[in-house]
Amino acid sequence: MTKKLFMKMTICLLLLMLLYSFSVQASIKVAVASNFKTTLIEIAALYEIETGQKILISSASTGILYHQIQQGAPFDLFLSADLKRAKLTEDSNKGVSGSRFTYAQGRIAFWAPKHADFVNADTLQKFKGRIAIANPKLAPYGLATEQTLNNLNLLQQFSYVQGANISQTYQFIDSGNVKAGFVAYSLLLEHQGRNFFLIPTSYHQPILQQGVLLTGSKKSLEVYNFMDYLTSTTIQRLIRSKGYLTIKYVN
Amino acid sequence: MLTELDYSAIILTFKLAGLTTLILLIISPPLAWWLARSRFVLRPFIEALVALPLVLPPTVLGFYLLISFSPDNFIGGLWLRLTGDTLAFSFIGLLIASVIYSLPFVVQPLQSAFVNLDKDYLEVAATLGFNSTETFYKVVFPMVLPSFIIAGALGFAHTVGEFGVVLMIGGNIPGETQLLSIALFDHVETLQYQQAHLLSFGLLAFSMTLLVLIYGVLKKRQQRMIDA
């Protein structure tokens, strides 16, 4: 009796696994830079409602994803946090040449959560001591921060604590360990951060977040459809509401 | 080739590992002795606490430390009032983290040595009229010396290999918190494979050598135990 029951359960389990594997097989696997993950989850949910197409999301830092892709990780689409790694992927045999596109443009803000009065350009000019920035060597937002401070002649005014990425930089300030620093505007919007000064884009090179189709993909048609969706007016408007600038295709 | 930053990261790593090992070799023996001998009700709980860094992801420790080091919280606030500096992103902060992180690696070899210590020797020492301090230095210590070497070397090696905790609470400050593992992470992320290879291979060779030495000592000791 119990044997029969056990057999039935096993068969059920195998069927479930089979169904699951079909559903996973049918989905598009997207490797996305950590900073865009929450936005992409929303977009993917909308896309599934509209088209029935499932999107499977893997997120890590752009650098780590780039390495995984170079080692043959089975993703269909790579959404990088910068232009550099997207271009490197496109130029390698892992990316489809001509498929690279810009899906969002980042903005940075100077954030001093516990600052007594209104935070503006003047606050930044007068601020003394230690600030948190994303590592300019690793993180595109960090590079933009460095360019901004350089343009304002403020590089020598501070001592720096570096986060490996922009989320970690946000945590350093949010946990109270550092009084102020430069973070992504999208993170401030997502977590209702207050007391920040949005840096005008003229102070730094554009933080272009680009995507590229991967050669290993067996579903390039579906991926192209999703790429069109990402750059459609509706979704670009959604991305804009999350604290990014948006533009159309850039070559 | 390796840059000046890499060399400073190497020096800093060894400084941190050395200091961590020194502190651990002072606090671990009494703790290990107590864990090996005590009948206290809460002993298993304390033992579990000591062993936690063996099983917890280092990021968990890093996360809690980042929170407790914050000036808004008791420990971080107290430190700020005493020294005028924050605990996070400082060498002292890393030292505290490393001591917690490598504690089981030093305590456990000592604890098993103390457990395996033959009671006869302690009884003989007692009949000779040794007090507990004398017993420890004249009888226990010479017998468990190999375990001390192993414990110290393991603690040192484990601290050299620290990454997750440092990434969470270090802040990547050259000469202060930029350790070898972080410098390596930077090189890999920025696609500087040559430096990454150099540092990785150096670490690999160092760890392997140290472990071979440790197990060499271990083998000799086991042989001695068998012979005795």
Image (cartoon, rainbow, N blue to C red):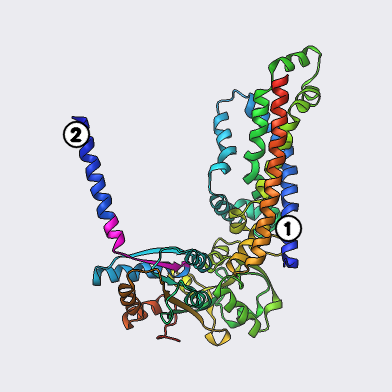
Q: Nearer the viewer, residue B43 or B106?
A: B106
Residue segment shown in magenta = A21-34
The answer to whether any part of residue A23 appears in the image is: yes
Q: Is residue B85 above or below residue B139?
A: below
Label 2: how many Cα within 10 Å (few below 14, some 14–19, many 20+): few
Residue A9, label in figure: none
Q: Nearer the viewer, residue B138 or B160?
A: B160
Q: Residue at x 63, y 80 (%)?
A: A149
Judge if badges 2 and 1 mark residues of a common chain: no
Q: Residue at x 26, y 52 (%)?
A: A18
Q: Amino acid at mark 1?
A: Ile
Specify the subunit that label 2 lies on: A
Which numbered disc, 2 or 1, marks the residue closer to the eye? 2
The answer to whether any part of residue B151 appears in the image is: no
Q: Secondary structure at mark 1?
A: helix
Q: Nearer the viewer, residue B1 or B190?
A: B1
Q: Amino acid at mark 2?
A: Lys
Specify the subunit that label 1 lies on: B
Residue B100: percent from left, percent from top: 63, 45
Disc 1 target residue: B10
Q: Secondary structure at mark 2?
A: helix
Residue A193: percent from left, percent from top: 48, 70
Whether residue A191 appears in magenta in the rendering, the answer is no
Disc 2 target residue: A4
Q: Quadrant of residue A232?
A: bottom left
